[in-house]
Amino acid sequence: MNALRANPGDNLLSRLITAREDGAGLTERELKATAGLVLAAGFETTVNLLGNGIALLTRHPSQLDTLRARPELWGNAVDEVLRFDPPVLLTGRMCARDTTIAGVPVRRGQLVTTVLAAANRDPEVFENPDAFDVTRQNARDHVSFGAGRHYCLGAQLARMEGEIGLRTIFSRFPDLRPLAGARRRPTRILRGFERLPTSLAPL
């Protein structure tokens, strides 16, 4: 941070360091917290979206064939990846008032863990929810970006990055295929690959 304070550049952290409102800027703690949030929410999640999408499409070649025949579905395919194998599995919320959820009393101030991945497989919302289907008409109804006041500010950017990234890699490397040795990161909140070996060359 000190280096950026001394020599600010044309980047997000420099702008945050130099930003002022009524003469006051962000504290060191606020800057570090924001930097961590940008890394996790703006980078790690997108990397996981791309990795999860590559894994799904190589495991479901008929779905990839559909996208090659109907490239206008790439945007929908990204939402189906987000629904089926989201980069963020769960999040937490603090209860604002006493309530009851599924017969369980929850008191004001209690923390509740919401499992986004489970909500994305809700059979009352998604027909045949355990099927990966890039043509799913309501794929965009997933909650991988949260909802309401907590809805992800970068949702549209993430969708764009996912669509461009996945479409480009499968266009550039049409023979891309998975190799043995894929391994998920051992994390409970973020879901992505620690290793995802692939071959770009034809058989």
Image (spheres, rainbow, N blue to C red):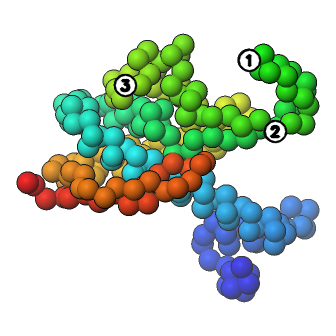
Q: Which mark is residue 131?
A: 3
Query: Residue at the spot x=71%, y=30% of the render?
Result: 148
Question: Where residue 203 sits in the image (x, y, percent)?
Answer: 8, 54
For residue 29, what is the image quadrant? bottom right
Q: Where does label 2 land, which residue?
A: 111
The percent coordinates of residue 178 (x first, y second) are 24, 52
Question: Which of the pair 50/19 is nearer the observer?
Answer: 50
Residue located 59% across and 38% down the image: 145
| Structural distance between the alpha carbons of marks 3 and 1 | 26 Å
Q: From the viewer's perspective, is 171 left or right of 95?
A: left
The answer to whether any part of residue 119 appears in the image is yes
Mark earlier in primary sequence (2, 1)? 1
Classed neighbour count for the residue bearing mark 1: other residues with Cα under 10 Å, few (<14), some (14–19), many (≥20): few
Q: Secondary structure at mark 1?
A: loop
Q: Residue 51, percent across and down?
A: 39, 51
Amino acid under label 3?
Answer: Ala
Left or right: 121 as drawn, with respect to 33? left
Q: Tag 3, which secondary structure? A: loop
**Element under disc 2:** strand
**Left or right of 32: which side holds 134?**
left
Mark 1 lies on residue: 102
Question: Gap between marks 2 and 3, in whole Å?
Answer: 32 Å
Crowd rating for badge 3 (residues with CA inside 10 Å; few <14, some 14–19, many 20+): few
The mark that comes first in sequence, 2 or 3, is: 2
| Of pointers 3 and 1, the one earlier in the residue sequence | 1
What whole-number distance in Å separates the C-alpha atoms at marks 2 and 1?
A: 16 Å
Find out whether the residues at labels 2 and 3 contact each other: C-beta distance under 8 Å: no
Using the image, tell me which numbered label, if any, was put on residue 76: none
